[in-house]
Image (spheres, helix red, strand yellow):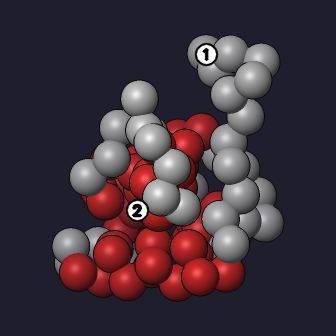
Amino acid sequence: MRKINEWALNPTPAESAWIKYKLELTGTTAKYLATKLSIDCRSVYNVIGGHRHSRKIEQEIAKVCGYPSWNDMLRSLRGENVA
């Protein structure tokens, strides 16, 4: 469970593009993630685009991209220190 100050960050358009690119590099598609998580593909695109939040989608995307969490991934992209 996230702490009250640990709300998921929203990706900027450039960060969304990077996430899509990184997923492509790993050979992962939104359709694959949707199937793996038993959800609709549109839900994955909404999270990548920053239109919606889903803890399980964010966690899976971060894992595929090599980060421990969604917020750590976005903070790293922003050049912030990740503890």
For residue 42, say whether it is visible. no
Q: Badge 2 local density, few (<14 within 10 Å), some, or many (20+)? A: many
> What residue is rendered at 31% in x and 59% in y?
65
For label 1, the crowd category at 10 Å Cα-Cα, with few meaning under 14, some 14 to 19 and many 20 or more, is: few
- Residue 56 x, y percent position in the rendering: 53, 41
* Residue 33: percent from left, percent from top: 40, 62
- Quarter-wise, where is residue 45 in the image? bottom right
Indicate the quadrant containing the N terminus: top left, top right, bottom left or bottom right.
Answer: top right
Q: Which residue type carries mark 1?
A: Met
Q: Quadrant of residue 16?
A: bottom right
In space, the residues marked 2 and 1 are separated at their CA atoms by 22 Å
**Residue closest to the eye, 9 or 77:** 77
Dot 1: what SS? loop
- For this view, does 65 lie left or right of residue 48? left
Three-letter residue code for mark 2: Leu
Residue 16 seen in the figure: yes
Residue 33, numbered circle? 2
| Residue at image coords 68%, 28% | 6
Q: Position of residue 10 (x, y in %)?
A: 71, 58
Compared across the picture, whether 41 is left or right of 32 comes to: right
Could you say which disc has been placed on residue 1 in the image? 1
